[in-house]
Amino acid sequence: MPNHRHHKFKVGICLAAVYLIWGSSFLFSKIAVRSLPVALLSGSRFLIAGTILALVARVSGGAVWPRTRREWLQGVVLGILMVVASNGLNLWAIQYMPSNQSALLNSTAAFWIAGFGVFGARGHPLSRRAVAGLVTGFVGTALMLIPDGHLPTAAIVAQSAALLGCLSWSLGTLYYRSLETRVSPLMLTAMQMWFGGAMMFAWGLASGDVARWHMDAAGLVAFAYLTLFSSCLAYTAYGWLSRNTRPALIGTYSYVNPLIAAFFGWEFLDERLSATQIAGMLIVIVGVLFVTLPATLHGATENAEAPPTGA
């Protein structure tokens, strides 16, 4: 019984970390891009975080470094999909849209993952409830793209970029699930961050981001938060959850994080959601529930071991 209580306590702490840290990361991303260029910001953050996680995995967990060309290549592919494309596009897009809308659009990753999850060796057919959830979710997403009852041309490129970032994250997640590797999840996550961060850092240097790097106090705090809390602490908490609890429970971040992000955007950035966007948000949450609830109801125990989306 004490061990059971201890396990439940750890699950609660790790879930709280994922909810609060990733939910608030959209606020800090919005603050960071006001003073820091996107490519150098993303590259520096993930290079530092990847190095820290690799050392933690090696020293504390005894994880082995990747040994084969194939294992190194897996880290490169994940870095391209989940750092360069996903985080890069989302960071660029958040410059031109409210942080709460960015979080709401990122919640659609649950739909992409479910939809593409029917393919491949580990694919599985969608239930009727899941199909209904996908349709419902995309209706809600369409409403979220219309803040004032009409389609704003000024933000459509940024919104499309955020959705493409979610698509890339989903493809990376499914690729992650299909890997056969001896590398531990934490070490593989570190390699993903390091390779993706190195590519973004090189891109930033080539595009002249150094001259545009003006880190004020707010930018420094945001950079530190995204590096240490969002990339290191929350990823570690999720890694433990992925190995010690149900995927359906972990998937609840898809509809909790946008709510937290919306609150922080309202409280600290004076962001508002229109009635149409609020309706879209509620519809998306219902859709995500349709997609994730069947796993709980049917007692699925398959371990996803895939990192979630976030800013």
Image: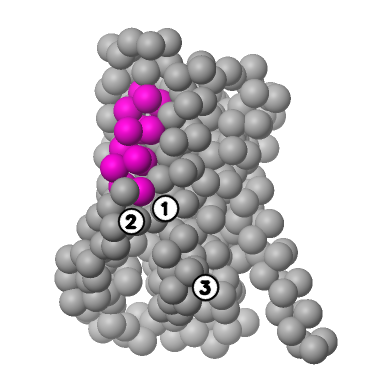
Q: Tell me which amino acid carries mark 1.
A: Phe
What is the secondary structure assignment of the residue under circle 1?
Answer: helix
Q: Residue at x 31, y 48 (%)?
A: 132
Q: Which mark is residue 246?
A: 3
The answer to whether marks 1 and 3 mark residues whose Cβ atoms lie closer than 8 Å is no
Q: Position of residue 188 (x, y in %)?
A: 40, 72
Q: Nearer the viewer, residue 69 or 108?
A: 108
Residue at 47% x, 76% y is 299
Q: Which residues are magenta?
A: 133-145
Give the residue pinned by disc 1. Answer: 290
Residue 21 belongs to magenta span: no
| Circle 1 or circle 3, nearest the eye | 1
In the image, is 94 to the left or to the right of 27? left
Instruction: Provide the residue designation for mark 2.
Output: 130
Q: Could you classify mark 1 by the number of other residues whose Cα lies within 10 Å: few (under 14), some (14-19), or many (20 or more)?
A: many
User: Of marks 2 and 3, which one's residue comes earlier in the chain?
Assistant: 2
Relative to 11, residue 60 above or below: below
| Viewport quadrant of the N terminus | bottom right
Are the residues flagged by discs 2 and 1 in contact, CB closer than 8 Å?
yes
Mark 3: which amino acid?
Arg
Q: Is residue 222 visible?
A: yes
